[in-house]
């Protein structure tokens, strides 16, 4: 696990993200090496987790390449290059089942 991944997991845990999963996807895609998937209790919680992650990543000199979904808070994707973070509401996460998609 890279220092960046450990840093992101620590931030997510600190902000009470639920069910944090780390997927090694470097053998499945050239887009990224790692995906981190976690849940928030509500759209407000999802947004707060994502905003804190973006803020702290910038302070560490890691500018996100892209952020999508922050407006609604159902599913926020933060592209940090070697790592993509998905912060989702529980229902959205269950519906899309990214863990099942990328683990198979």
Image (tube, rainbow, N blue to C red):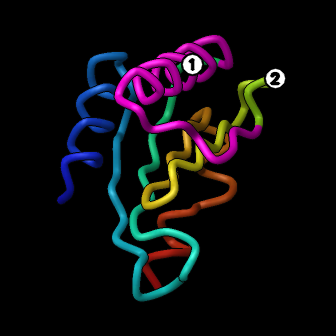
Number of the label disc, if any, that sits on residue 19: none
- Residue depicted at 81% across the width and 23% down the height: 71
Q: Measuring 19% from the left and 47% from the top, which residue is drawn there?
A: 3
Q: Nearer the viewer, residue 67 or 69?
A: 67
Q: x, y percentage for residue 12?
A: 35, 28
* SS at badge 1: helix
In the image as oriented, which residue stretches furthest toward the front? 61
- Report how many numbered discs are placed on residues in the image: 2
Residue 23: name its quadrant: bottom left
Q: What range of the chain is rendered magenta?
A: 43-68
* Residue 96 position in % (x across, y down): 67, 58
State which quarter of the image contains the N terminus. bottom left
Magenta stretch contains residue 48:
yes
* Residue 10 against residue 3 in the figure, above or below: above
Residue 47 percent across, percent down from the top left? 63, 19
Res. 59 image quadrant: top left
Depth check, front residue: 44 or 28: 28
Q: Residues within 10 Å of mark 1 (few under 14, many from 20)?
A: some
Asked if residue 56 lies in the magenta stretch, the reply is: yes
Q: Does residue 95 lie above or below 31 as drawn?
A: above
Furthest-right residue in view?
71
| Residue at (35% x, 28% y) in the render | 60
**Residue occupied by mark 1:** 51
**In the image, 97: left or right of 26?**
right
Per the image, the residue denoted by label 2 is 71
Mark 2 lies on a secondary structure that is loop
**Are circles 1 and 2 on residues that touch, CB within 8 Å?**
no
- Distance from disc 1 to disc 2, alpha carbons, whole Å, reads 11 Å
Q: How crowded is mark 2: few (under 14 residues within 10 Å), some or many (20 or more)?
A: few
> Magenta region, mostly helix, strand or loop?
helix
């Amino acid at each position: 696990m890279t220092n960046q991944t450990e840093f992101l997991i620590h931030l997510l845990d600190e902000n009470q993200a639920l069910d944090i999963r780390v997927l090694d996807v470097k053998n499945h895609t050239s887009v990224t090496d790692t995906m981190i998937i976690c849940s928030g209790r509500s759209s407000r919680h999802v947004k707060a987790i994502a905003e804190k992650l973006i803020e702290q990543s910038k302070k560490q000199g890691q500018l996100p390449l892209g952020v999508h979904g922050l407006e609604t808070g159902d599913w926020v994707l933060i592209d940090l290059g070697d790592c993509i973070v998905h912060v989702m509401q529980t229902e959205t996460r269950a519906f899309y089942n990214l863990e099942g998609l990328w683990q198979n």
